Structures are given as structure tokens and as C-alpha cells.
Amino acid sequence: MENKKKESLNKKYKYSQYVKQKSPKPKYLKNSVWAFFVGGIICMFGQFIINTLKNMGLNQDEAATANAIILIFIGAFLTGLGIYDKLGKRAGGGSIIPITGFANSIVAPAMEFKREGYIFGIGAKMFILAGPVLVYGFTSSVIVGLIYFFLGK
């Protein structure tokens, strides 16, 4: 019985070594550069939109609000066309962090589950990715607000 256990552990160890040897090595530098440039390009585009809207006569707050709306629309639209997912595969965190990534995280599950109907498909699954982010974001903001309220006075 003891020999079978040792043999089984030895096989598992050899298999794990084999898998480790055959698995592709992550390219951290290349992935980081792609994320940096794609995220930077998205942010530059957002700044271009703000500057254009300010030149059209909007103040800073109005331009920032309109910019967020435009970027969310573009992210959702590109997700609907299947372009944003391809960009995300290449850019990683560079495409996820800006607000366009938030739009993608809401639209992609809605599209995936639309065949299950409006209520049990789109309505129930739309926030499957973004929901936890929203819940923890709201919760942490309430906690910080309470701390500020009680300790700030």
C-alpha cells in the first residue's frame, strides 16, 4: 500500500514537471508594454474628447461628464461589434482599467446571455462581472464616508 502511494505521488510530481515544462512562459514585459500603450491611447483619446468639448463651449464638469458618456458608448459599441474583446486579448489591463473596460464588462455578459431572455438572461446576467465591483465600490465609499463623518469633525 505504501509503495502504491509513493508511486502515485511520483507520477503526479513527474506530470506536474512535464506540464510546467510544456506550458508557455508568460511574457511579462511584452504584456506590460501593450497594456501601457493601449491604456495610454484610450486615455489620450478621452483627453482629446474633453479638450474638443471644452473648445465647443462646455465647462470642465460638463466636458468630463460628456466624455464619460461618449467613452462608455464607444466601449459598448466596440464590444457589440466584437472589436473590444480582440483588443482586450492583446492589451490586457490596458483595455480593462479605463471606463471603456467597465462598459465592456456590462455589455459582454448581456450579449452572451441574451438568448435566455430579457429577464433571466440580460437582466440577471448583465452585472455578473461589474456587479461585485459596484457593490464593493459603493460599500467602501460608504465606510470611508462614515469614517470621515465621525472622525473628520
Image (cartoon, rainbow, N blue to C red):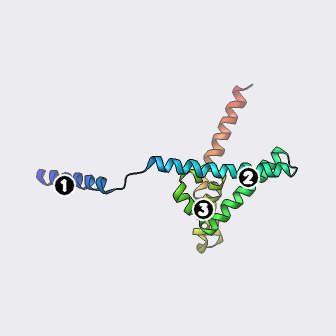
Residue 82, above or below 103: below
Q: Using a 10 Å C-alpha cutoff, classify the residue at mark 1 as few (fewer than 14 neighbours), some (14 to 19) or many (20 or more).
A: few
Mark 3: which secondary structure?
Answer: helix
- For badge 1, the amino acid type reads Ser
- For badge 3, the amino acid type reads Tyr
Q: Which mark is residue 68?
A: 2
Horizontal side of residue 50 vs 20, given as left or right: right
Q: CA distance from mark 1 to mark 2?
A: 57 Å
Mark 1: which secondary structure?
Answer: helix
**Residue 132 in sight:** no
Residue 123, above or below 93: below
Query: Which residue corresponds to the image point at 62% horizontal and 59% vertical from the top-left?
Result: 104
Mark 2: which secondary structure?
Answer: helix
Q: What is the quadrant of residue 91 in the picture?
A: bottom right
| Label 3 sits on residue | 84
Q: What is the quadrant of residue 8 in the picture?
A: bottom left
Horizontal side of residue 3 vs 107, given as left or right: left
Horizontal side of residue 98 vs 15, given as left or right: right
Residue 22, above or below 123: above
The front one of 59 and 9 is 59
Q: Are marks 3 and 2 in contact (CB under 8 Å)?
A: no
